Structure formats: C-alpha cells, structure tokens
C-alpha cells in the first residue's frame, strides 16, 4: 500500500484548530484544577436555610464537650450561613477538653494532598463571645503526626465582630489523605466562616493545580471553551452557572449546586479565573453562557432581555475599559488590561428547544451591535443543511461507539463550504467500547481527527470532552485526564490529542492512500516551521483501525528546497497488546521512555530510514 504525500500542495489549517473544553464535571474544577483544598468553605453547601448540613466538615468531640450548629450570622450578604461552635469543655476544671481539643475538620475532596516543605495559606473568618485560642493544623489520616500547625490567639475585643485571620503552614511531612482541623481547648462560643486552605505554589500564582495545567500545556491548546456543557444550562435555570455570582472577592461568592452533575461548587473557580487560565495558557477563551434555557425550563423570548444584558455585561467584564461598570470589577480583581475574549457560544445543545432561535437572535443582535468583532457560535448543526440564522460557527457534538466514530472521519467531506464553519467542541468514543478510556477509543478518535484535519477548510475548532475526571467522582466516562488529590495520568484519548498538537496553523499537505487498502487505514500529513529551532517539519499521521499489520510505502513528492534529515527524524507509535488496554495511576509517565512498558502512551524512537521514500509497518 502506498501513501503519496505531495509536499507542494497544501492549505493552511486554522490557527484555532486544536483546543480544550473544560467543564465543571467529575469535580474537574472544584477538587481538581482549582487548588482550593477545603470543600464547602463557607458552609453554604447544605442550602441557605439553617440548620444546615455542613458536609464534608466533621466534628471533633462529643456532645459533652462541643455543640456544632449553623446560623445565618455571616458578615457576607450573599452567603449568610456560618458555623457556630459552642465549646462546653475547657483547658482545666471538671469538664476538661480531650487532648488535641475539640472542633471541626475538613478532608476537602477525598483527602487533601499535603507535601513536605510546601507552604499552605489558611484564611478564615472568625467571631467569638470571648477571647479565642484556636489551633489551625494539617493532619494526615488518624494516628499520623501533625503535618503543620499554628495558633490563632485573639482577645475578646479583637474578635467580637467578624475578623479575617490568615496563617501560613509549612508541612513537615507529606500525606495525600490529609485534613484541615480547627480545634480549641477553651470554653466559649466561636463562629467560623469562609475557611480556605490553598498551597502557595499554584500555576503562575493564580490558584490552579500545576501538574494538571502542565498536562494541558503539553497538548498546546489554541482555545479554552468553558465552563460547560450541561453545567452552563443546569437541570433547572435556578441552578445554572451565572457568572456574576462567581466574580469579586472569593469570600463573597455564594457558590452554587450544579444540579446536572450533582455537586456543590464554592465557585472559587469563577468567570474571572477561567479567563485568567486561558491567558496563562496563552490561548483564546471561548465563553459559553446560559441563554435562558436549562434542561427543564426556558425563559420566553419576550422576557429574555435580562439574560441578554447579563451576557453583554460578561463581555464588558472581560474586555471593557477599567472605568466601565463591569471592567472596573475586573480591574479591582487585579487585571486592568482586558482579557482577549473574542468568541462566545449562545447556550449549549439547545437548538431543539422551543425558545432557542428566538432567544438566540436577541443575543446575536445585541452582541453584534455592541461588539461587532465577537465571533458567535450557534448550537444548531450546520453540517447537513445550512443554518437558518446568522452565526460565525456552529457547534457540533458527537459521542459514539468506536466503529461509528471512526467512520465519521468522513462526516464533513460533503458539508457545505459556504456557510459558517464547524466547531467540533465535544467528541469522544463512549459506551462499552471505551471502558474507562482505552486504546480502542483513542484509535477511533485518531481516525475521526484525521478526517477533521482533512476537512479543516470547514472545521475550524476541535476539542475532546470531557477533559478531566477526579477518580473519586466519575460522573462521565471516559475522560482525557484522570486524577486524584496527588496523582494523574492521560487516557489514550489524551495522548491522541498530543499527536495533533502541531496541527493548529500548520499546512495540510495532500496525502492519499493508494493500492488495495481497506477503509480502516487513514492518513494525513502536515508541515510547519518550528518557531524555536527554525526547522521545517513534516508530520505524517497514520491510523490502522484494521486487524492486520499494513506494509506501507510512504513517498513524499515535490519536496523542493528541502531534504529529509535522517538524524532527528522520529517515529511515534501509540499501541498496546490489547485494544481494551487502559492507563492507570500506577505508572503515569515513566512509560514514555520505556518502549516495552505495557502502557498506552506514545513511544518515540529514531526513524532510521527517513527519506523521500520509506517503508514502514503499521501495526494492527
Ligand atoms: O461532555 C459531557 C456532556 O456531554 C456535556 O456537558 C454536554 O454538552 C454533552 O451532552
């Protein structure tokens, strides 16, 4: 079988081509990318009414020594619930407090990862009827030594009103299953609210978990679509993501219950932080906002204007003048320069909803008249028939079994070249074929992506979904990056994206398979000049979805002004003994250099016979 690559025939692939889609699903943000260690830091997760459930906070002490309750005495207007501790025991006397004191502890998101030598900043708000002596400590699982501790000591007059306290704790040891404890041995009443614990060293100092962001950097995303998905819509509108509730000082954010993926978020990772993440990754933010439609209720077009205004305000917040109403809030949060917001999506998967078109048109005309340069993404599929409304891109989602997704490599071959281009913002192999993220899924996705690359004149942006899963809360399976409090690994679907990292902005070459080939072989070729070493590269990607090895002769024709270097040319293979093989926490990255490791990750080796004509074997 022959693969002919014509190096003189090419067309540009859009700069935006490969990106990522971050959704707050599977505790991807809260308990994941956002490095906050405390879960339910404002005690609001149990709802706004008291008495309220304080989960996952737990009590240290029994009823003879401590009564813990909630009331609505917080100094924060949008989140009134505070924790009240009636300490009945004392440091001496008849009712002596147990060793270590009484109080509360929070294990965060299935245990906090505390690392030796690292510093953690604990911030909390406190009030009391008398003087206080509170120990703030980080502890491993029971029976293990204290990892770090400090005392908060204050006179009655200092804490008679709500007071912000801050301590820095340096860990003496590591423990991946730790908790934050607030304890005392002094009788009296103490209230706590907005208790936060964050490592000091987060990605670029902006609050993100560095190891997880580095996985994103490695696939060179050209855009960041956020914050959902269904998370944006909500099962009910009252639980949808509303950006204004997620900006400003973190203590004042009410937090909300995401009713699609069924968990509470304190919204420390809010609209501002998403824009910051995009900027830190040097990528384009794509803001998906609620358009007055959830899974179960809709705002009628005649009364949708508050939602339209909210969307306009969100754009002003992102890029308005620092003296404008919403731009000044951004500036006050430490970012006077505008964020580079140029793309918005009006809703998610709502095209078939009763009010979608009516609402969409209202959003579209208001945004285009205020911000003509903003590119607008419609939820309606324009791949089979032209859209009946104006849009810059149409959103396309596809979740299928492996064979079906592989065959969809040709989905856009006959799509209209005239209208808006496609944003394939969610794709994945799902169901039994995919396991928890196996080679079969990755392989089918690779074939699909080759098809999209070949159709990059009409497919402008692509992202896999979902991006992250905290292994303690798999709401959706499979996902690209699996993590817990301390570990992480990429599924084959992640590594497939890694193969396409150079595609954005590259030149797509004409690459055609000839001979008695089956439809299970797909190939594409790109070329680009690396800005760092100034060398020009050709990258040929081949997917063999069949059950036999293929002997392939690759011929690169019309290579003018360049020759192919033997030294430095490489071959990278993603395969495994079994199609259903998956990666695991056990050996997250070692495998990249161990060619014989049984892990589904790309293995790179020198391409000995690199040249204009080369024979390669593509494994089944
Ligand atoms: O990626 C998971 C979900 O799939 C998204 O929230 C939604 O857009 C789609 O249905």
Image (cartoon, rainbow, N blue to C red):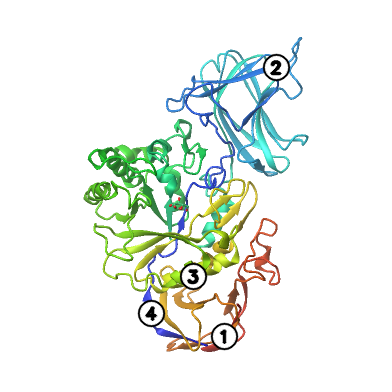
Is disc 1 surrounded by few (<14), some (14 to 19) or many (20+) residues within 10 Å?
Answer: some
From the top left corner, tell me how far across and down residue 91 is, in percent.
73, 15
Q: Is residue 133 above or below residue 445?
A: above
Which secondary structure, mark 3?
helix
Q: State the CA–CA distance, disc 1 to disc 3.
A: 29 Å
From the top left corner, tell me how far across and down residue 495 is, in percent.
56, 65
Q: Is residue 397 left or right of residue 494?
A: left
Between 578 and 189, the one lying in front of the other is 578
- Residue drawn at 43 percent across, 84 percent down: 7
* Badge 3 or badge 2: first in the primary sequence: 2
Q: Which residue is mark 1?
A: 610
Q: Which residue is mark 2?
A: 65
- Residue drawn at 57 percent across, 56 percent down: 481
Q: State the CA–CA distance, disc 3 to disc 2.
A: 63 Å
From the top left corner, tell me how far across and down residue 210 is, in percent.
57, 51
Q: State the CA–CA distance, disc 3 to disc 4.
A: 24 Å
């Amino acid at each position: 079988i022959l693969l002919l690559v014509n190096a003189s025939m090419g067309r540009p692939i859009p700069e935006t081509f490969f990106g990522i889609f971050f959704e707050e699903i599977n505790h991807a943000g809260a308990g994941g990318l956002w490095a906050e260690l405390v879960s339910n830091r404002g005690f609001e997760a149990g709802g706004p009414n008291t008495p309220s459930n304080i989960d996952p906070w737990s009590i240290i002490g029994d009823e003879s020594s401590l009564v813990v309750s909630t009331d609505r005495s917080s100094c924060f207007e949008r989140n009134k619930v505070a924790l009240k501790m009636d300490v009945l025991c004392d440091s001496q006397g008849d009712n002596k407090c147990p060793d270590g004191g009484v109080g509360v502890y929070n294990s965060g998101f299935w245990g906090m990862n505390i690392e030796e030598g690292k510093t953690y900043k604990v911030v909390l708000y406190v009030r009391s009827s008398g003087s206080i002596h509170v120990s703030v400590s980080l502890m491993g699982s029971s029976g293990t030594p204290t990892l770090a501790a400090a005392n908060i000591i204050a006179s009655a007059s200092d804490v008679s009103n709500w007071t912000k306290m801050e301590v820095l704790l340096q860990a003496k040891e590591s423990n991946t299953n730790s908790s934050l404890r607030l304890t005392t041995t002094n009788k009296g009443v103490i209230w706590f609210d907005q208790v936060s614990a964050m490592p000091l060293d987060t990605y670029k100092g902006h609050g993100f978990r560095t190891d997880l962001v580095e996985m994103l950097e490695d696939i060179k995303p050209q855009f960041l679509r956020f914050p959902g998905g269904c998370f944006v819509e909500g099962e009910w509108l009252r639980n949808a993501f509303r950006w204004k509730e997620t900006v400003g000082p973190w203590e004042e954010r009410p937090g909300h219950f995401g009713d699609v993926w069924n968990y509470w978020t304190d919204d420390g990772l809010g609209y501002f932080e998403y824009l910051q993440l995009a900027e830190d990754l040097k990528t384009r933010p794509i803001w998906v906002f609620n358009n007055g439609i959830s899974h179960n209720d809709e705002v009628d077009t005649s009364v949708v204007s508050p939602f339209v205004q909210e969307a306009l305000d969100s754009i002003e917040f992102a890029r308005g003048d620092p003296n404008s109403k919403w731009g000044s809030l951004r500036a006050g949060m430490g970012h006077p320069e505008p964020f580079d917001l140029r793309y918005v999506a009006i809703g998610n998967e709502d095209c078939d909803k009763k009010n979608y078109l009516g609402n969409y048109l209202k959003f579209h005309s208001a945004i285009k008249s205020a911000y003509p340069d903003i590119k607008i993404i419609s939820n309606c599929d324009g791949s089979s028939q032209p859209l009946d409304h104006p849009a810059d891109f149409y959103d396309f989602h596809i979740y299928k079994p492996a064979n079906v997704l592989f065959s969809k490599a040709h989905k856009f071959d006959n799509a209209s070249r005239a209208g808006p281009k496609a944003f394939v913002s969610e794709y994945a192999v799902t169901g039994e074929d995919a396991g928890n993220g196996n080679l079969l899924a990755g392989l089918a996705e690779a074939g699909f992506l080759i098809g999209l690359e070949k159709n990059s004149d009409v497919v402008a942006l692509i992202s896999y979904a979902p991006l992250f899963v905290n292994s303690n809360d798999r709401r959706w399976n499979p996902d690209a990056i699996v993590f817990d409090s301390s570990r992480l690994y990429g599924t084959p679907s992640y590594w497939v994206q890694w193969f396409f990292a150079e595609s954005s902005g590259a030149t797509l070459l004409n690459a055609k398979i000839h001979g008695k080939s089956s439809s299970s072989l797909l190939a594409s070729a790109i070329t680009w000049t690396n800005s760092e070493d100034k060398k020009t590269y050709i990258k040929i990607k081949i997917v063999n979805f069949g059950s036999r090895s293929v002997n392939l002769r690759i011929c690169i024709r019309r290579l003018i002004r360049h020759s192919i270097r033997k030294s430095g040319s490489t071959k990278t293979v993603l395969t495994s003994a079994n199609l259903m093989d998956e990666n695991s926490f056990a050996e997250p990255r070692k495998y990249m250099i161990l060619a014989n490791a049984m892990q589904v990750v790309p293995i790179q080796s020198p391409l000995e016979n690199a040249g204009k004509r080369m024979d390669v074997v593509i494994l089944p």
